[in-house]
Image (spheres, rainbow, N blue to C red):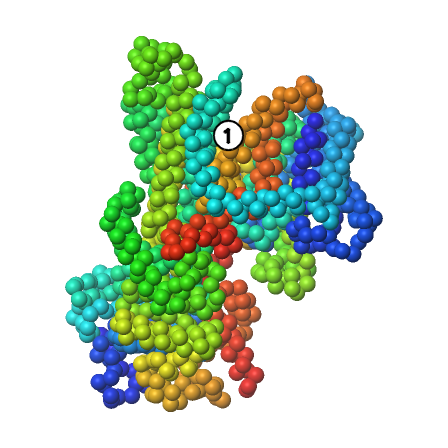
Amino acid sequence: MEYFVQQLINGLTLGSIYGLIAIGYTMVYGIIGMINFAHGDIFMIGAFISLAVFLLLTSVLGFAFLPVVLLIVLIVAMLFTSAWGWTVERLAYRPLRGSFRLAPLITAIGMSIVLQNFVQITQGARVKPLPPQIRGGVTVMQGSTEAGTIVVQLSYMQMIIIVTTLVLMTAFTLLIARTSLGRAQRACEQDRKMAALLGVNVDRTISLTFVMGAALAAVAGLMFLLLYGVIDFYIGFLAGVKAFTAAVLGGIGSLPGAMLGGLLIGLIEVFWSGYFTVEYKDVAAFSILAIVLIFLPSGLLGKPEVEKV
Amino acid sequence: MVLATEKNAPVGGAAARNWEHDPVLSVEHLTMRFGGLVAVGDLSFDVGRGDITALIGPNGAGKTTVFNCVTGFYKPTEGRIIMRHGPGRQESTVDAVTASGLRWKKEIGSGVFLLERMPDHEISHKAKVARTFQNIRLFGGMTLLENLLVAQHNPLVVASGFTFGGIFGVPSYRRAEQAAIDRAVYWLERTSLIDRADDPAADLPYGAQRRLEIARAMCTGPELLCLDEPAAGLNPRESAELNALLKFICEEHKTSVLLIEHDMGVVMEISDHIVVLDYGVKISDGDAETVRTDPNVIAAYLGVEEEEEIDIPEVLEDVAETVGDPSGIDLKSKGGSSKPKSRAKRGNGKGGKA
Amino acid sequence: MASSTTGVKVSGKKPAGDQAETPSRGHAPSPAGPGGGSRFQGSLRDAATAAFVAGVLGFFFIGLRTDIAPGGLDIKARWTAWIVSILVVFAGRLALNLFVFKAERPVTLGLAAQLSGVGETLPGLSKWLVRLLLVFALVLPFFLMTVFPSKQRQFIDLAILIMTYIMLGWGLNIVVGLAGLLDLGYVAFYAVGAYSFALLSQYFDFGFWMALPLAGLLAAFWGVILGFPVLRLRGDYLAIVTLAFGEIIRIVLLNWYQFTNGPDGISGIPKPTLFGLEFSRSEDGFAAFFGLEYAPIHRFIYLYYIILALALITNVVTIRLRRLPIGRAWEALREDEIACRSLGINTRNTKLTAFAIGAMFGGFAGSFFATRQGFISPESFSFIESAMILAIVVLGGLGSQIGVVVASVAMIGGIEMLRNLGFLTQIFGSGFDPVQYRMLIFGLAMVLIMVWKPRGLVSTREPTAVLKEKKRIGAEAVAQGEGH
């Protein structure tokens, strides 16, 4: 039981990170109907920027008060990563808007390769370890078995991740539901041409979607960095694929779906590692994706697609 | 399970009524629900062999849904759809097939197919029901000739020895392909498209695309041809040509035709039999003259002052729901299905009148 | 250092600053209104914007570098590189603005006209061009041996590599180009083919020629197994599930130690023989049998001809299939699945056939890969391989056989050529290693080619049946399959 609760906490933490990345996928897919393959690498970029800002603040400028440092890191990383997201859209996707469907997918894969290799060349291929910054936590449960006592811990780090995710999720849901930007986004989702005719600046709306997605990915990057303490130029691929899996699982185009899918993928992964084998955790996540799609082709919270004849 | 003639259909003149004694297609108690919406409710009608049968009704009456059920694109919620090859009602075979759980039974010169049990491609391949689409579905990037060859897929696959023989270029396949091309050329000539045989279908003007779709459907060698608004968007001259083509198909090829049409000129001129739908139920059934004078039809087309005359409260409820709920309207604007849209429109129109 | 690469990247971008004025894309001459001075000013402003963006993007990557240092991580500044990168972007952008984007007569105009001219005359020439290419491919090893005797082995190896990708591209073209099913996990079948041969040789002592058909069949079998559940899915869902399957197969290969030897891979895979003759120094080897002097290059030439033959078989089969009902059904499926069903085509079986046949050729290529390398490990079958093969198919032009050849030669050959640019070290200093930039340039090329020609290099479709006159069909009429 204790073991189960601990896994549950770990799963939710990991799932939050996936969920944050998944939102970027789901928003972009919703609005222009393409898989932004480079989004996983935007997450990686976010993690690298976070690391650089963190080191700048602590070792160069000598800031020591951690909460302020982390807040600054968060804001700077979100800003700069957004710039990357914006540029990728501007360079690789906008020229192909309205072009045929596979072209932006290929440029997206190309951009993913470019980002990975750009970071590899400029920052080196070796992993960057960052010692844990936030230590400690609270004990949630305690139990004893034959093997000894098991302590279920909810670390401060995990709390921060889950709370931040919740806050951001709420903020974004409100943003989409209440603001004119959200309305413009939903309009573009429904019918881009009509939205343009009605005076919605489609290009700007799409750009902002990418910017928002990138900002959330930056948050996820920072959390990943703090949680695991190791990043390299390749983390974007797997995290990206899993986050996309999460987005599809939850029903692509749906924000709550992305979050739900992220949590589910995180839980599946952690529980599979905890109870079965670590090696096959990705297989488990992908298999669940395939099974869900086969039996529920529009995901858990997606709108069912009626075949039009 | 014999379906009695509907109360609306007048009695008498039995000799001319193909659909009563020799129906190629029988739709029995067909019901199709989408969620809470009843698109077609307990609909029964027969299509006579060798007839041109028109399915008419105002927008959103459920005509296309009936088509989609007949051709297997939708699985009906309830009901039975019988396709017959060979003469007569074949009651005993129909009952035997229904009881047996089989999808069809075929003998030389006759056959009974329960379409609601069959997947769409089998309906075309085995039951020999071909169709066209309301919003034309051609293979735009393929030439006209290729379009018509794709339609002859099944016989050609057999002739190509399920591809294996074809890869090695067996002569029997070459002969079969030549025959297929000849058949395609025949239909291209019939539809006056032969000059453009080597052009991609997407380059054709609208009217020609409609004709090509009919030619393509005919290349499958159907017993029953279902046409979804074949005259939509045609100019009067093209409409007249279409009439001639349909008559030719019916008379020369003994193919029965079931069509959905709004153009009453076309319908009244060529139809042997007309079935009128409104809100998913049949309101009239008979030959052109019967239907033309049926007060129910006039009410449905010209509108009625008191809504009570349409005596189906649950359908009206659906209408009200769709109209009242903005999301319902939203839904329709996105998709191709015209049903919710037209319901909403009609509802609004009535509201304005009242 | 890295500045040059950023320069390339950002210079590829379309006007950033003037999006408000000219939202329409394309290289139409700029509006007649502005005179020369304001055009220059506009270009300048635009270039400044681009430089600013480059500065922002590069700040944490070019300007700073984190490194592992004794006491944890260390951060170093590289301001020169950062400033140089900004300047390069500024200059490149300005030049592009002045001469291409905003110029009255873009310098690329002539080039574009020439290229399109080539495209128009191509159909007439293509028959001869294809024959010429075929002859060239047939004599290539001897050509290379005569012209580049010092580098013959390296070049023949490169030719083998390119030919492998051509074959894979042709195989995937059946699935993506003809049937319109977006498959992002094609490498799985490549892996199945490679591992089938490796394991058959390890456990049952199979030789290459015996294992080859089995490997193809196994791959086709896997194609059906994986294809069966996913064929109901549309477009991007299909893409992501195939990607997932590709990853699953790789992870299983990686972790099933007892069977596949895990990440260590399988080594000692036998080389192909010529009717039992080995390409070795031994008495009964190929050289001795034909009375030739033994040379290791013989084996490479032989490998080249094997892959050439396999690729040509793939091509011939594909061309024939296109003219058979099944091939027409694939293309019809790509155009309109619902119409296909209304014509009595069993779409599920049709899709499965495409999957299986595509997978089979992938399996053949995988077997060949195993025998060429003599060693395989799961590392060779990562997603990037699938992406590269798909890129070749799409860049070449969906459904176009010759396009695959052009794209393979350009992408694989071009990238490998970077290894030969040793002279660049003289310009950029000894620390400069062009090979490092391979994948970066590959990615950039993917983006640039797609932006330049979204429908691929060869975008017209050839009809499969002709009544009177063969006319090629323009890309705008041809559909791309799932997910419209």
Eyeballing the image, is A242 above or below B251?
A: above
Total numbered labels = 1
Q: Residue at x 32, y 76 (%)?
A: B247
How far across and down, in percent of the image, does residue C327 sit? Answer: 36, 48
Q: Relative to residue B5, is residue C90 drawn left or right?
A: right
Eyeballing the image, is B330 above or below C246?
A: below
**Quarter placement of the N terminus of chain C:** top right
How far across and down, in percent of the image, does residue C360 sit? Answer: 36, 37
How far across and down, in percent of the image, does residue B243 sit? Answer: 37, 76
Q: Residue at x 51, y 39 (%)?
A: C391
Q: Relative to residue C334, is residue C282 drawn left or right?
A: left
Residue closer to the observer: C315 or A60: C315
- Please state which amino acid type lies under the numbered disc 1: Thr
Residue at numbered disc 1? A149
Instruction: Place residue A115 in its image quadrant.
Output: top right
Q: Residue at x 36, y 64 (%)?
A: B188
Q: Relative to residue B118, is residue C389 drawn left or right?
A: right
Label 1: few (<14), some (14–19) or many (≥20) C-alpha neighbours in 10 Å? few
Residue closer to the observer: A112 or B184: B184
Chain under disc 1: A
Residue closer to the observer: C461 or C478: C461
How far across and down, in percent of the image, does residue B26 sit? Answer: 27, 73
Outermost residue to the top: C283
User: Is any part of residue B58 visible from this angle?
Assistant: yes
Q: Is label 1 in a helix, a strand or a loop?
A: strand
Q: Residue at x 81, y 49 (%)?
A: C36
Instruction: Place residue B296 in its image quadrant.
Output: bottom left
User: Is any part of residue A300 visible from this angle?
Assistant: no
Eyeballing the image, is B281 above or below C35?
A: below
Eyeballing the image, is B205 above or below A237?
A: below
